[in-house]
């Protein structure tokens, strides 16, 4: 007999000798008598009958189960609600949930304390800034400018139009600004 290797891409068809060898291999793996074959087929038929019977019994029990629930007033929605409630309670009692809850509570408290400290620091800085000489000087200039505008606009015939009042106030403001960079506050008029 000729030795050759066959692969998936071989284009030669199987010869009769190859087919006989293949069928011999299949039969040698599972040699059984006709009697054993009939026994197995009978057992298979019994199992199929039992499975069919069990399916019928299960369907009957499921119907009975549904009827009893209906009589008790248990609806699918109420079952879902109960399952969710039970699941939520189970989750809350888990150690992972408790640890996470404790961690988040602690983080919330620390964050609150940090924001409180930050708020106090900002308030203190604004207070310091408001009491600083440069802020007081700026505040006085704004007050003087507002007062000057009020007196010029409020007095009939004193200053002309609103634009004239603004330009004269701006000129007066620029003349009041000290040109040297000393830390002394300018004298109040």
Image (tube, rainbow, N blue to C red):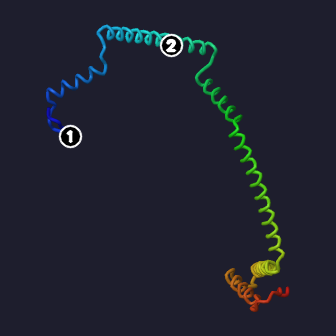
In terms of image quadrants, where is residue 165?
A: bottom right
Q: Residue at x 83, y 87 (%)?
A: 184
For residue 28, above or below residue 4: above
> What is the distance, in whole Å, between disc 1 and disc 2 at their CAs?
52 Å
| In the foreground, 153 or 103 | 103
Residue 127 numbered mark, or none: none
Picture coordinates of residue 100, whole percent (x, y) = 70, 44
Picture coordinates of residue 159, whole percent (x, y) = 73, 85
Outermost residue, bottom side: 180
Is residue 12 visible in this depiction of the protein? yes
Mark 2 nearby-residue class (10 Å; few <14, some 14–19, many ≥20): few
Q: Residue at x 26, y 20 (%)?
A: 27
Q: SS of the residue at dot 2? A: helix
For residue 31, above or below residue 11: above
Where does label 1 land, which residue? 9
Where does label 2 land, which residue? 58
Q: Is residue 115 left or right of residue 55?
A: right
Q: Quadrant of the C terminus?
A: bottom right
Front: mark 1 or 2: 1
In terms of image quadrants, where is residue 93?
A: top right
Which of pointers 1 and 2 lies earlier in the amino acid sequence? 1
Q: Is residue 80 left or right of residue 98?
A: left
Outermost residue, front side: 1
| In the foreground, 79 or 18 | 18
| In the foreground, 53 or 112 | 53
Q: SS of the residue at dot 1? A: loop
Q: Residue at x 67, y 33 (%)?
A: 88
Mark 1 nearby-residue class (10 Å; few <14, some 14–19, many ≥20): few
């Amino acid at each position: 007999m000729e030795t050759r290797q066959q692969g998936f891409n071989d284009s030669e068809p199987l010869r009769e000798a190859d087919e006989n060898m293949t069928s011999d291999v299949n039969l040698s793996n599972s040699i059984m008598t006709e009697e054993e074959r009939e026994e197995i087929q009978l057992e298979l038929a019994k199992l199929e009958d039992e499975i069919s019977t069990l399916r019928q019994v299960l369907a009957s029990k499921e119907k009975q189960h549904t009827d009893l629930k209906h009589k008790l007033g248990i609806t699918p929605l109420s079952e879902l609600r109960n399952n969710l409630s039970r699941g939520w309670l189970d989750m809350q009692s888990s150690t992972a949930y408790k640890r996470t809850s404790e961690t988040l509570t602690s983080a919330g408290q620390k964050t609150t304390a940090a924001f409180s400290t930050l708020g106090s620091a900002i308030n203190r800085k604004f207070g310091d800034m408001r009491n600083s000489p440069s802020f007081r000087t700026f505040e006085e200039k704004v007050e003087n400018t507002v007062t000057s505008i009020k007196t010029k606009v409020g007095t009939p015939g004193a200053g002309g139009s609103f634009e004239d009042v603004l330009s004269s106030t701006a000129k007066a403001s620029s003349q009041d600004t000290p040109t040297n960079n000393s830390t002394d506050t300018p004298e109040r008029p």
